Amino acid sequence: MRVENDHCDVIGVPAAPTQLDRLSSAILRQAGMARVSLPGDVATWAAARHQTLRQMLSDQRFNKDWRQWRALQDGEIPEDHPLIGICKVDNMTTAHGADHRRLRGLLSSSFAPSRIALLAPRVEQCVDRLLAEMAQRGGSADLMSEFAAPLPTNVIAELFGLPDEQREEIVALTYSLANTSATGEEVRQTRQRIPEFFRRLIALKRGQLGDDLASALIVARDKGELVSDTELIDMLFMVLSAGFVTTAGVIGNGVLALLTHPQQLHLVRSGQVPWSQAIEEILRWGSSAANLPFRYATQDVEIDGCLVRRGDAVLMAFHAANRDEKAFGPGANRFDVTRRHNPHLSFGEGPHACLGAALARLELRCAFPALFGRLEDLALTIAAEDVVYMPSYVIRCPQRLPVSFRPSVA
């Protein structure tokens, strides 16, 4: 049975990330694709079932070009809506076809698994340094600001060639852009500051080009492989922001999961479950990619029993898809490190599969064993329900994670 748009129940997407589990359950209870209303009265579809989302990620009838979004083109989405800064960009994440292959090709060799594997010693050194600094400061810390965020930030900044004095600013800009509760004025300021930041960076790097990603993209612009300064700026921002905020969220969510499931943690620390397997479960259950905007229908498409009209936007509900019982069994809502069949979609799939997946896995494989091996009696100092998250229904990332610990003598 085909369902027309106007005949579906509409589910309101709450601004508070603490309601994410409840939202995902509500979307999964729908018979087919769900109609959702995002804050700011933005009506879209949500692809939440694992099979449906997986199919859509490789379906050429959907793409990520914001110019396809009918509501945006018709003026229904104001320019100061928080989603505009996330969606209205021209880089690898929004391109399709030949343009996508061109842009992805500029970065693919730098993120090849064999190339990333060579970074292991540098990632381990960064982990060791951060843990040593935490231990020197005493037996308590905010795990987000002192470990989960600095680790991927420093790794990608080094690959990128970002000077130390500019790292704090780009982190703040990235978090501002991901804030889906931002006011119109905050949205306008962030959208103005991001290109200003990268124009300054480009001017600086042109005088000292090196063996780093920023230099490579600047050279690509000079050679005409990037077709505009806007494309260069958007590509630079994509590499930096995607390189740390999502991994920081997974580290924070993973630590929270393990500390609130002590029996699961025991299985890993005792060696009964390998860290590699536990990390895949952390990626599934604690993915920071909650609800990513958007795929746009380039034609009328009947999918999952619903008619998606040309120009409709589809929210990619990864958090819900990773809890779909049809894919993960009756215990899909449970955090279970013994799970062996784990086809999670946390890195996406298809042409737009996350280019940084190998780097993220490397960082997680270095971070978790060292964190729980070097910090004895690691524990939350607040109740789990009191953890404050980034104000975003797009990214699920704790803002603070207060912990206590005892440095290991090992």
Image: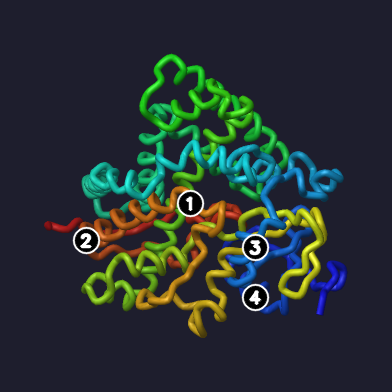
Upstream in the sequence, badge 4 or badge 1? 4
Residue on which the image places disc 1? 246
Left or right of residue 98, residue 122 in this image: left
Q: Are marks 3 and 2 in contact (CB under 8 Å)?
A: no
Q: Quadrant of residue 29?
A: bottom right
The C terminus sits in image quarter: bottom left
Q: Residue furthest top?
A: 207
Left or right of residue 137, residue 401 in this image: right
Residue found 31% across the figure and 57% down from its top: 365
Element at badge 1?
helix
Residue on which the image places disc 4? 28
Residue on which the image places disc 2? 373
Residue 207 shows up from this direction: yes
Residue found 40% across the figure and 17% down from its top: 208
Above or below 327: residue 396:
above
Residue found 86% across the figure and 73% down from its top: 7
Q: Nearer the viewer, residue 97 or 284?
A: 97
Residue 56: mark:
3
Upstream in the sequence, badge 3 or badge 2? 3
Q: CA distance from mark 4 to mark 1?
A: 24 Å
